[in-house]
Image (cartoon, rainbow, N blue to C red):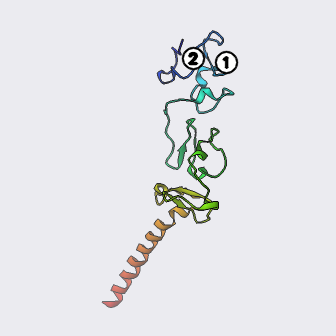
Amino acid sequence: MLISDGPQEFQNILPQTGLCRIDERACGNNECVKTDYVCDGEPDCRDRSDEQNCPSLRSCEPNEFMCTNGRCVQKMWLCDGDDDCGDNSDEQACSHRAASDGCATSEFKCRDGRQCVPLSFHCDGTNDCQDGSDEVFISFIFNLFIYFFFFGAISKINNI
């Protein structure tokens, strides 16, 4: 029998068995967990089956990455060698390390050389590099604009 109570989105995640209470679901290893714990972003089954195949019901903040298990972690933690998600999904898309062999053509290399971030994160208004170097160019352009606007206005006044 499949889950028949609880949110519709989770009905096919874990089966209802005679081994567990009515408010619990059986993990893949036959452990029992509360139905409320299925797809909550935290693995409660030792085999993590309560967080597998979950629909994405949440969204993360713009400066966050959504892990496969639904947890949100800081984008700057992507590809840093630490399993911040708890399911290693923040490290799985990393084909390399900035320190060892450079960034892929689809990535921006942070100034410190220890981190690569997707090019789409470059100049998006959010510091994704730990050193903030993915946003330096936009600050430079803004400062350059202010410089020329300000000094251009002064030189026009002096020429009058």
| Farthest top residue in view | 18
Identified at 34% across, 86% down, the residue is 157
Quadrant location of the C terminus? bottom left
Find disc 2 in the rendering and name its residue.
15
Residue 109 coordinates in the image, percent (x, y): 55, 62
| Farthest bottom residue in view | 159
Residue 126 coordinates in the image, percent (x, y): 51, 56
- For the residue labelled by badge 1, is the local secondary structure a helix, a strand or a loop? loop
| In contact (CB < 8 Å): disc 1 and disc 2 | no
In this rendering, is residue 118 above or below 160? above
In this rendering, is residue 14 above or below 108? above
* Real-space CA distance between mark 1 and mark 2, rounded to the nearest whole angstrom: 10 Å
Identified at 43% across, 77% down, the residue is 147
Find disc 1 in the rendering and name its residue.
30
Quadrant location of the N terminus? top right
The crowd level at tag 1 (other Cα within 10 Å; few <14, some 14-19, many 20+) is some
88 sits left or right of 148 in the view? right
Asked whether 146 or 121 is in front, the reply is 121
Residue 43 coordinates in the image, percent (x, y): 64, 31
Asked whether 15 or 141 is in front, the reply is 15
In this rendering, is residue 21 above or below 145? above
Residue type of the residue flagged with mark 1: Asn
Quarter occupied by residue 65? top right
Quarter occupied by residue 110? bottom right
Residue type of the residue flagged with mark 2: Pro
| Farthest left residue in view | 160
Identified at 67% across, 18% down, the residue is 30
